[in-house]
Structure formats: structure tokens, C-alpha cells
Amino acid sequence: MENILTVFIDLDDTIWWFSENSLISLRHVYNVFSIARFCPDYEWFKSVYTTKNKELWDLYHYGMISTDFLKTERFRFTLWKTGYKGNCVELAKRMDEEYLSFLSLQSTLVPGAKELLEYLVDKGYEVNVLSNGFKNVQSRKLKSAGVAHYINRIILSDDCGITKPMPGIFEYALCVCGASPATSVMIGDNFDADIRGAHNAGWRTIFFNKNGEPIHESSVADFSVDKLLDIKHIL
Ligand SMILES: [Mg+2]
């Protein structure tokens, strides 16, 4: 890929292994708050939470709900489904705080992430994170995983009030980094938020298709890889 100076890369499930780390943290919260007292089936609890969380993230991506609502509602809904008789909102808030704080201490990276970041920085690219994740939590994740020093800037939807895939966050990112669409590339695992969003903003794109999903609009992604280290052949 020619004439690239600035690399923007998604964080969750592209660099930092959210799917793994979030399950460890959910189990931690289930234990710490002794949820088994009124919901002994952890697998059921996990499945209700995971489905609701995904539904809320889809709404958040499109700016339809706030971060505060998302954080409380995913646990409030799950507690309510268990039939918990106490104050679901109050407990949900405490659970989410514990969940996020424990989560941000987890250090598991997507295989190849550290090597890729090191390679990109060695090659002279400016590497920035562009994420829809929460303020405070995202930078702690990078520190916990020992890769914060590779990242020039962390640009978050929480800072500009606009989420990927909306064009505004891509314009904001260019402005903050003094970059231009012609010399920028977006790397991410979410075809809609990362790849379609960046493509619509005039950037080039590399889709990290880690699950080997069929891509119906292949023209939107300039390149697709199923392993992060394959990006070394592109950049
Ligand atoms: Mg992601």
C-alpha cells in the first residue's frame, strides 16, 4: 500500500483481545457479587448479558444511546431477567464499575498484535488507536498489555461524541493527528464500524477478518487479512 504515513487501528478485538478478557471479567463480577445466590446458572447469566450487551453496542454505534445508559442497562437488564428482588439499577452500576476496572487490568492481546505494532513503529508509521470504547478504560488496557508505548494518540468516540462508523469521528481523528485521508489507513475487525466508516471517509482500509466472515462488499476493504501479521506484507 503506497503513500501511507498514518495508521489508525481499532483496539478491542484488533489489538487487545476483548472477547477473551471480557469473559474473564464477567466471571469475576459474577463471583464478587455472589450472583449465584439468586442465579446459579452462570452460562445462562453470561448468555443473557452477552446478547443484551451486543444489542446495546449496536445502538451505541449509531448514536442512539449514551455510554452511561449502555453501561448500566446491560447489567440491569440481566439482573432483572434473573428475578433479582433488590434494586437492579443500583447493583448494576456497581457491577459495571467493577467489571470495567477489572477488565482494564487484563493483558491478553490478539495473537500477533505486539509484533505488528512494533513492526509498524519500526517502519516509521505514526500509529494511533481509533476506538468506540470508553475513556480511561482504553488507555489502561494498552498499559496493562504493555503496548502503550507504540501508540502515538488514542482517539475515542467518548472524546468527540461521535461513534464509528459515522464520518465525524474520522474527520475528528484526522484533525487531531494532522493527517490526511490520502495518507491514512484504518485497520479494524468490525466491517461496518471500522471498514465501511473509514472507506466512506475516503481512507484506505485493511479488514482484520479474524473469523473468516464472507465479505459481500469486498470493494469497501482495500485488503483483508485473517492474521494480523499478514499486514506486514501490505504496509
Ligand atoms: Mg473491534
Image (cartoon, helix red, strand yellow):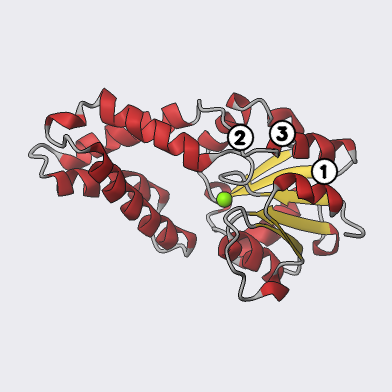
Seen in the picture, residue 135 relative to 9 is either above or below; the reply is above
In which quarter of the view is residue 201 placed?
bottom right
Give amino acid for label 2: Leu
1 or 2: tag closer to the N-terminus: 2
Label 2 with label 3: CB-CB less than 8 Å: yes
x and y, in percent, of residue 84 in the image: 11, 40
Question: Between marks 1 and 2, how big is the CA–CA gap?
Answer: 20 Å
Type of the residue with mark 3: Lys
At x 30%, y 43%, the residue is 46
The residue drawn where x is 27% and y is 31% is 30
Query: Which residue in the protein does label 1 denote?
Result: 126
Residue at far left of view: 85
Q: Is residue 231 left or right of residue 64?
A: right
Q: Rounded to the nearest whole Å, what is the CA distance between mark 3 and mark 1? A: 15 Å
Q: Amino acid at mark 1?
A: Glu
Q: Quadrant of residue 194?
A: bottom right
Q: Which residue is mark 2?
A: 109
Q: Earlier in the sequence, mark 3 or mark 1?
A: 3
On the image, the x and y values in percent for residue 120 come to: 83, 41
